[in-house]
Image (tube, rainbow, N blue to C red):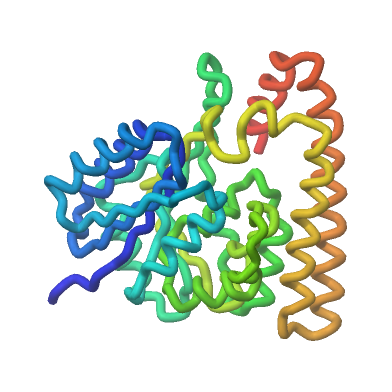
Amino acid sequence: MQEQLITIGVPTYNRPEGLRHTLECLHKQTYKNLRIVISDNCSDAEELVNSIVNEFIEKDSRIEFFRQKSNIGAIKNLMFLLDKAQTEFFMWAADDDEFSESLVEELQHTLLKSSDAAVVISGVKVTDKMEAERPITIELTQYLQKLSGSTAFDRFNNYIKQPVEYGRARILWGLCRRDALNRAVNDVVNRSDKAEILWIDFPVDLQILKYGDVIVVPKELFHVYLLPSSDGLREGNLFDKKEIKMCKRSYDAYRRVVSNSTFTSDQKKYLNMILIKQERKDLIKIIPFYFIKRFSPWLARNLKKLYFKLI
């Protein structure tokens, strides 16, 4: 039986060597019927990016390349790639991740068997390399498996109760039914809005659970690297006084998703109560950690490593 065409969208910005590694991972996939679409968000090193992309185009005719004339922001770059897809199944592949050669094949095999699923992800291992000499590694698979539920309310409840550091946002990087992903994006984003959309205003990972379940292939086929160049994760941005405001804004986005759902008033009240509790917990963690980070980065790093070991 012929493999069904799958579109892979690759957003990239100022990480040419990361892009090279991602394209190598995609080029080697055991699932061959792929359309690989790259969107460069106006990287500074235009010539280097073009050189790397052309190197792969020469050996892989499945690749299409677009370069934005100006930086449109990370979220609009993601949406640009989604809009280029016409296939039933779609996934984004970041330019700082690493994945097994069998990733797409195993995700597709699982999604085809799971008619109730909107998205399938694999097990994930995350390595925080914000400080290269003392990386922190955590396996998220066991937590991701707890997001599944038989109803949209169950899935929302599981998602909201799970701490953000357990990796629930990885849903966004799974193999999706494109119709469900499109509907989720349209639910939370005004595509005609010319203002820049931030990650905290893009709760698509929660919204897509309205349209189907999330299934986890238990194998750790995906390895995420948090690097100093990772968008939104630079040391200078992570640990400043704006983080509290950003946390609150993120939870406001979740509350909008709940308020716009078709759940009963009692279900919405319950979910909003959980969101209030989780927001308070996050703020309790944020304030002392960032205070410590400001005065002792070494101590903050070791507290973070200890915390990851405990969870």
Q: Residue at x 71, y 67 (%)?
A: 157
* Snapshot quadrant of residue 290: top right
User: In the rendered view, would you say 252 is above or below 297?
Assistant: below
Spot the residue most to the front.
69
Residue at 57%, 25% (x, y): give it.
130
Of the 4 image quadrants, the one containing the C terminus is: top right
Q: Horizontal placement of 227 versus 164: left or right?
A: left
Position in image of residue 77 (x %, y %): 49, 55
Image coords of residue 285 (percent x, y): 81, 37
In this view, the residue in front, 102 or 98, is: 98
Q: Residue at x 67, y 58 (%)?
A: 195
Looking at the image, residue 76 lies above or below residue 97: below
Which quadrant, please, contains the N terminus? bottom left
Q: How far from the left and from the top, in percent, is residue 242?
A: 80, 38
Between 50 and 126, the one lying in front of the other is: 50
Which is nearer the eye, 277 or 2? 2
